[in-house]
Image: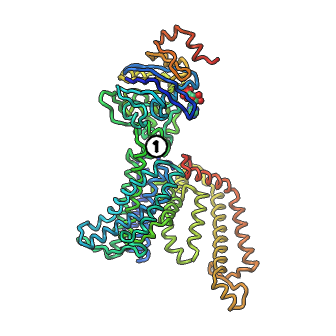
Amino acid sequence: MPPQEQSPRSSARVTVVRILPIALVLGALIGLPRFADMAFLNAMVMVCIAALYAMGYNLLWGQAGLISFGHATYFAFGASCTIMTMAAIEGGSSFPTPLLPLAGGAASFLMGLVAGWFATIRTGVYFAMITVAITELVRAIVQRWDSMFGGEAGITSIRMAWGPIGFQKLLDVYYFTLAWTIIGILLLWFLQRSPLGTVIRGIREQEERVRFLGYDTHALKTLVFAISAGVSGMAGGLLAFTNESTNVALYEGAYSTTVLINTVIGGAGVFLGPVVGATLTTLFGYYVANLTYYWLLYMGLLFMVIVVYAPRGISGLGVDAVRRLRSGAPVRWDLLGRFALGWLVVTIGAIMTIELIGAVVQPSYGALARSSGVAWPPVRVFWVSWSPASPLTLGGIALLFGLGAVLLRDTAGTASRNVSTLADAIAGKPGPGV
Amino acid sequence: MLCVRDLHAAYGNIHVLRGVSFEIVGGQIATILGRNGSGRSTTCKAVMGLLPPLHGQVQLDGVNLAGRESHDIAHAGLGYVPEERLIFTTLTVEENLVLGQKPAKPGAARWTMDELYDLFPRLRERRNIRAGFLSGGEQQMLTMFRTLLGNPCAILIDEPTEGLAPKIVDVVGETILEMKRRGLAVILMEQKLSMAMKVTDTVLVMGHGQIVFTGTPQAFEADPGIRRQWLEVA
Ligand SMILES: Nc1ncnc2c1ncn2[C@@H]1O[C@H](COP(=O)(O)OP(=O)(O)O)[C@@H](O)[C@H]1O
Ligand SMILES: [Mg+2]
């Protein structure tokens, strides 16, 4: 996870190259409601929340090199405290509605100070284990303390108007979420650029060196943990604000895993990498879930492929590609074409396999077989009906995988190298990759 | 004034330092000589609190620092340039220097980044490059500058010239003399009778985890027995 490089050459051009795509994306996001339907706008609200959550999370990973397995606690606690504040506003408190995410952020920051103090006593695997232990502890308390956190039913409240802004329309919620997400990301950007950011990257590289330069590294790591928790809590606050409710289920491990997956898929080593991952998986959840019952399985497979073949995530692949192009190295179109084709046939083969098996194992399939009198009734995949047991279908799938194996034959070495790099990163060893 | 008294330190049950004592005032250079493995680096680590001492005192201007955390010791005004040139390879040269910056204690010499760049302009040219790409000599200068930006009162420098080209050794020597001119107490750890002998005010020899000789460079030169017994490889 190298820090962003600063090269002296033609800094104006570099600035344009960096700013332009961001300006375009921002423009598109601001203009989006003119083109998008309600469903897509809703999805984009969730994208913003997931993106801010992952950005907060990645302050720990990408900058301090600490991989937390229990960040759901801070996301959920931010949501809980925000909904409580919303309820207070409903009850007459003068807390300004637009600042609600700050209530969640501040609460999670404070919790992060305490939790972070314990967790950052150690690094690597031990750090990760402490984060899990703290999450379980908090979950156990929250799920029993119904009078405070609302139990299974959760807490509901409503968004109260503030001045001219009603916060009733989806449009208001969208712009509100977008604005806070951008504020949070800017905060992280300036933090990373500040001397504190430099110290934190120094700690990741070699903590002892930072200590004898006069820094209390434990205090600094605690602070970074708390800021990371606070930004994640802000994201949780946005979720509570959007849904007008929270639920103790938010404290469960799945929400810790999601943010980790988003960060890995997007890439921890590039500043906006987690945004890429969060966008992809959230939209994946919205749209692929409509197409197939097994969408989570596909997401798991995508995650595994990225861990094995591109441990620096999608944004890492992008950065590498740009760097290679700039360096003037020739593009190996033959290799690229072969790999693209290889992945295409393997993907088609995998989808066929999963959808056919997935259809056959469902109880309704057995009932259909009995009622129709056909042993293996056909299954529709890719707009075609396939007979699951016919030699043609099975042979076709085998052919796809065989072809894929031939086309991708020389990628096994990369894969095993990447896996060992990732294992090192999780164990807290500084290394070149990830 | 840095004053080390009866310092003991161990790695597990390997007792390496067995009562190290020496003192040095500001504006002076002391060189601790010793064979490989004689315990000079361990002395640095014990003084800096990176290896908590078992016993003894480390006094800087009358304040005992032994047993404190290393960041506290650094803040009290002790600088350390480790032997392994522990730069941050993934940070740029300038980021490495920024990491070293610390407010000066009253009475301590103050250093600015520009002054240091003037001492070794090559680092200024390369300030936006990742430090991992620097040559050994450049890394050594970077480590020294990083420590100086913390405005220390006393500085421990562990084998600053090991493996460096003669030209860079001269720059290192000049920088050390500049530290002396500005009133720092400088402690050099050396293995051989190197550049240090030209600049040092005091020679100390380390053996068996203790200081076995203290004297002027002339007294040291005049006593070949010391060299034979404690420095030359049998
Ligand atoms: N991390 C360590 N663990 C155990 N023993 C060590 C360690 N570092 C140094 N030693 C031992 O301590 C002794 C002194 O080492 P050191 O202080 O590095 O000597 P010098 O710097 O004079 O070459 C040596 O015998 C060395 O083997
Ligand atoms: Mg040594």
Q: How packed is label 1: few (under 14 Cα within 10 Å), some, or many (20 or more)?
A: many
Residue A290 point in image, percent of width and height: 53, 78
Residue B129 point in image, percent of width and height: 47, 40
For this rendering, which residue is in front, A258 or A1? A258
Residue A388 point in image, percent of width and height: 70, 80
Q: Amino acid at mark 1?
A: Gly
For this rendering, which residue is in front, B107 or A394? B107
The answer for which chain carries disc 1 is A
For this rendering, which residue is in front, A161 or B114? A161
Q: Residue at x 65, y 61 (%)?
A: A339
Image side of residue A2 versus residue A309, left or right:
left
The residue that label 1 is drawn on is A202
Q: How many marks?
A: 1
Residue A217 visible to the viewer: yes
Image side of residue A36 versus residue A123, left or right:
left
Q: Residue at x 45, y 34 (%)?
A: B49
Asked if B145 appears above or below A297 in the picture, the reply is: above
Image side of residue A5 versus residue A355, left or right:
left
Residue A52 visible to the viewer: no
For this rendering, which residue is in front, A68 or A160? A68
Residue A82 point in image, percent of width and height: 34, 66
Asked if B77 appears above or below A78 in the picture, the reply is: above
Splitting the image into 4 quarters, where does residue A346 fall? bottom right
Instruction: Please name the colour scheme applied to the rendered image.
Output: rainbow
Q: Residue at x 43, y 43 (%)?
A: A217
Asked if A55 appears above or below B168 in the picture, the reply is: below
